[in-house]
Amino acid sequence: MSEAQTTAPAVDPAEKRSVRDLVRAAISGWLGTALEFMDYQLYSLAAALVFADLFFSSENPAVAVVAAMATYGVGYVARPVGAFFFARLGDKTGRTKVLFYTILLMGLATTLIGFLPTYNQVGVLAPILLVLLRIAQGFGAGAEISGAGVMLAEYAPAKRRGIIASLVALGTNCGTLLASGIWAILLVAYSEQEVIDWAWRIPFIGSAVIMLFAIWVRFNLKETPVFEEREDVVDGKALSKEDTIKLATETGDVRTLEAMERKPWKAFSIALLLRFGQAGNSGMIQTYLISYITVVLLLDRSIGVNAVIVSSLVAFITVPLSGWLGDRFGRKRMYMIWAVIALIVIVPTMLMISSGVTLQVFIGYVVLHNLAVMSFASLENLTLPELFGARNRYTFTAMAREIAAIVATGAGPVIAAAWVSAATGSFIPIIIMLFIFTLRAHIPSFWMPGVAGRALPAPRAGICAPRTPPGCGRDTRPHPTPPPLLRNPRNDHRARRRHHHQPRPQLRDAEDHDVRRHHRPR
């Protein structure tokens, strides 16, 4: 059965929430992601512009710049640790509770940066405090975007999950654009000395406004109906592993027992590769390619920055469109289609960018960024949560995202810079690496199951392991007894055809879509 035809359970848990609840959840997910990316963009711009002078010794300016960038990287190191801690907590106590903690931690850390003393005021204590706040910021951010994706997936109606969950990807655009706009205004409105003296604090302290609004939205946000419907959740808290096994044994819940016994490593591998491809392309295009335009092609810095802004605006169309197409044709099929399109456009767009002509650079960058990065970003915010069972969905989604991101986004630009330098400025290494990362997202799409519309309260992962246990990938329930064949040989084929079109037993949920593929009438 095709993915797009997968049916949802008779009663969709999302129906237990009103439209107002869904809107509140959507705004909450969008705001949290926007605040996360605004915080990181604010810091990255500040690190490049003023932090080397403010928080590090000015005796060696080059060392000060390196130290400022190193504190930026510390936040990324803290992300997987925070993802593991908060995501496990979210699987045990609820998504919305944890998302309240993450946005509070992120927002406070960002706001407090605006009140830090400088190196000239307190000496070495200034960079120590800055690093501690960056660790706190990364610790909270590690579980934010994954939690927002899980929350919206579990809140949204089955047929609208893609377009609603795409709001998480739109939040990344909003945060990046807002931070870039704030810094652009500061640099125009104030002199360089005023920015260094005090104006740099404005965006960090001002971020408290968004934080307070996001906290207010999440404070009264109801828990996701999928979490509340989990069979191992009692009084808003998940049972321990031992109690869950005991309950499943007493009630004869085979699915839960299988989910407890078999970890979803195959689903995790697919999620890791899907995320690795998108994160690798993101690091190459959004980080290294801007440097390539400025350093290698020797174009004005404003060209790369303006290309990012224009492409981010175009993404307000690309992201919801990709989510809608995922609802209409299925995640699996759209991953394949977007990957093929991205593979096709890599060479012509890189030829346009390397030409050095401003218009061609803009067109090439916008097309490549939207088709090779933002289209996948929209799909992955929903596909990754749908791959896992309800009991550990948050944990595996967060770890797949953060492990792949820290490897691909961290290593990709470094390897590309060294390779291009060794190739005397040739853009061929960039093309090769973009092909590799895109194939990393394309190949696992053949292995992944059709997960669109599956029942998210199901305890098992959306893909069965190669060894097929009872009830996973094969229907073990009795088949309907075929009617006796008519004695007239001419009518035998009609009787068989009538039996072939008899209604099949109703499957318990859309998680068992693989069962339909193996079902054959006897």
Image: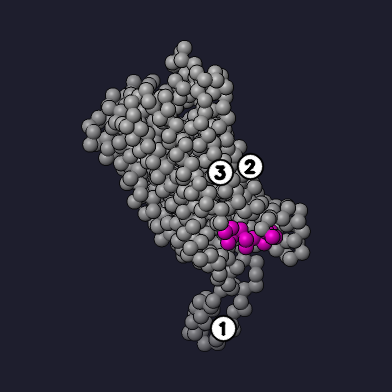
Q: Is residue 455 magenta?
A: no
Q: Report the front residue among 487 and 219.
A: 219
Among the 4 quarters of the image, the one containing residue 190: top left
The mark lying in front, picked from 3 and 2, is 3
Tell me the amino acid under the disc marked 1: Leu
Tell me the amino acid under the disc marked 2: Phe
Q: Which mark is residue 477?
A: none
Mark 2 = which residue? 85
Q: How far across and how far down the image is residue 182, in percent?
A: 37, 37
Colouring mode (rainbow / by chain / secondary structure / one colour)? one colour
Q: Where is 44 relative to 226, above or below? A: above
| CB contact under 8 Å: marks 3 and 2 | no
How far apart marks 3 and 2 lie (CA) works out to 15 Å
Mark 1 surroundings: few (<14), some (14-19) or many (≥20) residues within 10 A = some
Residue at (51% x, 36% y) in the render: 110
Residue 438 appears left or right of 225:
left
Tell me the amino acid under the disc marked 3: Leu
Mark 1 = which residue? 485
Q: Where is 359 relative to 125, above or below? A: below
